[in-house]
Image (cartoon, rainbow, N blue to C red):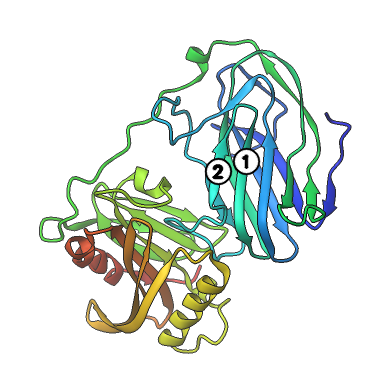
Amino acid sequence: MPEVEAANRGIIIDRKYSLLNDPDGAPVTSAEVGQPVQVTLTIIAPSNLHYVVVEDPLPAGADAVNPNLQTSSQVGTQPSLSRERPLSRGWGWWWFSNTEFRDEKVVLYATYLARGTYQFEYVMYPGLAGEYNVIPPTGQEFYFPEVYGRGDGSLFTITGGSASETVDPPAEEPVAESTDSAETTLSESFTAESGISVTHPAGWVASEDTTQGVLQIASSADALTRDTFIAGDAGLIIYDPAFLALLPDADTPQALLESFVQLVQENGDGEMGFGDIYELSVGEKDVPAVDFGQGDTEGIAFVVETANGDRVLVFAAAFEGERDEVQPLLLDIAASISYTAP
């Protein structure tokens, strides 16, 4: 339906198709049968929204890959959500609280959507050759449907081909053999474009989001994609000094931590709980810290001051019940953090 144009009545939505294996993410209007396509929804909330429903209809000849079903073809990656304003990142910090993969569309639900710009990505699997009119994506407040947005309609073409010839099997994910700090040494280094350097155990995986100033380190690649940890998962989220500069009233490490916790509590959906702030030993320094928990994930948030005086915010987390065992290793990783302004 390319003749249908976008509409903005309080929500702005845009949809882009790109080939999953294209590192540049160039927009496409066609793909071969079996060629995985990444769908990127950009959702802009000009003001705070409540009880939001976003629907993205699929081309009739394609299906969305649901990674939560063991019977699904595991092509590509798990769906992910990032907030381009850097308040939502990491395990369980999903602003959309529920995602449904239906035969004809993908549906997102959010009880609260703070003012800002969001991107949601998932993988679509073309299965039947043909030329398809695609209904535009829409978003609205459930109880106030006059707050509404619609993207452009489009035409998507699926050409003939063999799925077995175009789809590569998913790569086997590296898995850390042990998270016991007594048996694990920090043997690999990673330097992010943001200027953060950190040392971590062999087999662990690092991933940087340059748009948000966030570095994630986890015990496996699978752990990076999960919205909440499972048994054996552990890792850290590190927010760089540029991100922390956006926080108000953060002139001391404790004030910085308090400001961040307050923002999470004000803008989140209440699923993340925090304890009281206390002192924690990281390396040779005592730093302000706070315990947190969300779902099956629990850990500590704390502020580390690097050798040159810059501050980074760290979330060190593990699966519920495994925190005490893995915490010494996570704190060793945190103590290795250094920062050089790019």
Q: Amino acid at mark 1?
A: Val
Q: Are marks 2 and 1 in contact (CB under 8 Å)?
A: yes
Image quadrant holding the N terminus, namely top right
Position of residue 205 measured from the top left corner of the image (x, y, whole percent): 34, 49
Mark 2 surroundings: few (<14), some (14-19) or many (≥20) residues within 10 A: some
Position of residue 193 measured from the top left corner of the image (x, y, whole percent): 48, 59
Position of residue 29 measured from the top left corner of the image (x, y, whole percent): 73, 27
- The answer to which quarter of the image holds residue 10 is bottom right
Q: Which residue bears the numbered disc 2?
A: 99
Is residue 280 shown above or below 190? below
Give 174 or 290, whichever is nearer the viewer.
290
Q: Earlier in the sequence, mark 2 or mark 1?
A: 2
Mark 1 surroundings: few (<14), some (14-19) or many (≥20) residues within 10 A: some
Residue at 62% from the left image edge and 41% from the top image edge: 107
Residue at 41% from the left image edge and 70% from the top image edge: 273
Residue 312 shown left or right of residue 26 in the figure: left
Q: Amino acid at mark 2?
A: Thr
Residue at 61% from the left image edge and 45% from the top image edge: 108
Position of residue 331 measured from the top left corner of the image (x, y, whole percent): 25, 69
Give 145 or 62, whichever is nearer the viewer.
145
Q: CA distance from mark 2 to mark 1?
A: 6 Å
Is residue 149 shown above or below 137? below
Residue 235 shown left or right of residue 113 in the figure: left
Q: Work out which residue is located at the far left of the displayed protein and give it.
A: 182
Q: Secondary structure at mark 1?
A: strand
Residue at 51% from the left image edge and 73% from the top image edge: 265
Q: Which residue bears the numbered disc 1?
A: 107
Residue 186 shown left or right of residue 300 in the figure: left
